[in-house]
Image (tube, helix red, strand yellow):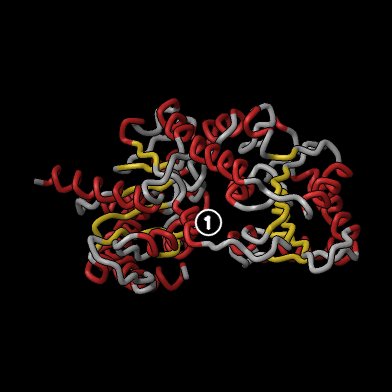
Amino acid sequence: MALGCRLLGPTLAGRLCARFIVADPGSGPACLCISRDVFSKDIDQLRVRTDRAWPHVSQALLYLCEQAWLPSSYFRQGAFQDELPGLSSAAVAKTERFAVSFLRSAQARHAIGAVMSGSIDYAQDEWIRRAAQRSGIPFLALCKEHAITDYGYRVFAASLSGYRYHGDGVAVFGPRSRDILGDESVFPPERVWITGPPRLDEWCDLLPAPRRDIAVLFSFSNDYQDGSASWPDVLAAFAAAAAASTQQGLRFVVKCRDPYEEEAVQQFVTASGAPVEVISFTPLPDLLRRAFAAVGFCSLAIVEALLSPATVISPRFGACQNDVDAQFDDRDEALGALVRFPASPDALTDEVLRAASAGIAPEEADARLAVLHAVFCAPAPTYSALVDRFVDEQIARAARRSA
C-alpha cells in the first residue's frame, strides 16, 4: 500500500483512500469516524440509535497510506508528538497533501461536518486533524479507553503525561477520564463531555434469553495485559469447571480479542482436552445475555457483564491482584456485593459451578445498574444520543467561530 501511494502521489492517494470510506444512509451533517477495533462497536450503535450519518474509514488504512512518507518510528501512540520536529519538511508536506485530498474527497461524497476518532493520541490521526481544522471542520475524539480504579487512573494518566491534545472536543465514558485529561493538562476539562459508552446501548433491545447456558471467560493471555502471568492458571480453573459440570446443555466459552489470540488459546484448550470452546468473532452481548457466569480481569468487557444475568467473577490470585486491576476494586463495598473475587484457582472453579444454579435477583440487577451509572453516567435516553449532542455542539461551535 505504501509503495502504491508513493507511486500515485499524495493527492491521488488521498482521493483513492476516500473511496474506502464506508457510507451511512443517515442524515447530515455527517460525522466521519476513524474506526479501530472496539471503537467500531460504538460506531455501530451510533448508526443505529441516531439520525446522523456516521460514515467511517479504517485507521489501519490511513496508517498504511501514511507510511508512504513517514518513518515507522513516528507511529507511536502518544509519543508521536516528540517525533514531529524531526520529520523532514518534504515528508510533512506530502502527508499533509494526502490528508487534505482525502478530506476534500470525503466531504464531496459524504457531506462531512465533523471528524471523530476513538482516542486522543493516535499518530495516524494527526494529519487528518490538521486538514480538518484548516477546513473549519471540528476534529473530535470519543475516548474508547476508561479507567475506573485508582490503579487504572495512574496507568492512564502516566500514558498521557506530557501529551497535549490539539483537537476541538473530547467525549469520555465517565468522570474519571475527564479528571485525568485535566490533571495531566492534556485538554481543558470544561470542554470534555461525559457521554458514557455507546456500545452499551445494544443492551436496550436485548430480550432475556430463554436459558442461561453459557459460562464465558474473557481472555487476557497477551503479555502486555495486566494479570497475564496468571492466565494459564485462570484458564485451567475454568476448564476444570467445564470438566466437572454435570448439567446437560451447558457451554463453556473463552472469548478472545482476535483470531491470533484465539489460535494460541485453542492450542492450550486442545492439549488439555477440556470441553471448552474458543471464539473471537461472536458479539459480546450475544454471549452475555445467555451467560450464567462471566469471568475476566482488568477489562471493560467484565464491566459490561454487570448488565447481564451472569454471576460476575474476577480472580484475585497470582498476578491477578487488586492493585493491578483498572476496572474492579475489591475494597469497594457496593461492588463486593455484586462481584465474586475468588482467591485461588479452586475457588474460581467452585464459583463457576455454583453460578450454573444461581440467579440474579431484581434488586441485584438494579444495584449493578447503579454501579455502572456511577462509573460512566446515566444514559439520556441513550449513550449514543449523548454523543450525538456532543457532535452537534462541536459543529455549532465551529460555525460560530467561522461566522
- Give the crowd class for mark 1: few <14, some 14-19, many >=20 residues within 10 Å: few
Query: Which residue is depicted at the point 24% across and 46% down?
Result: 393
Q: At which x and y percent is residue 186?
A: 40, 33
Count of marks placed on residues: 1
Residue 245 appears left or right of 380: right
> Which quadrant of the figure has residue 178?
top left
Label 1: which secondary element = loop
> Which quadrant of the figure has residue 336?
top right
Query: Which residue is depicted at the point 58% across and 60% down?
Result: 285
Q: Name the residue under label 1.
A: 38
Q: At which x and y percent is residue 70?
A: 44, 55
Q: Is residue 244 above or below residue 338?
A: below
Residue located farthest toward the left when viewing the structure as drawn: 403
Q: What residue type is labelled 1?
A: Val
Between 295 and 308, the one nearer to me in the picture: 308
**Residue 19 can be seen, yes or no:** yes
Query: Which residue is depicted at the point 39% across and 59% down?
Result: 46
Q: At which x and y percent is residue 290?
A: 66, 61
Residue 94 appears left or right of 216: left
Between 354 and 331, the one nearer to me in the picture: 354
Residue 52 appears left or right of 199: left
Q: Is residue 84 above or below residue 259?
A: above
Between 202 and 325, the one nearer to me in the picture: 202
Q: At which x and y percent is residue 32?
A: 33, 60
Q: Is residue 245 above or below residue 350?
A: below
> Which quadrant of the figure has residue 188?
top left
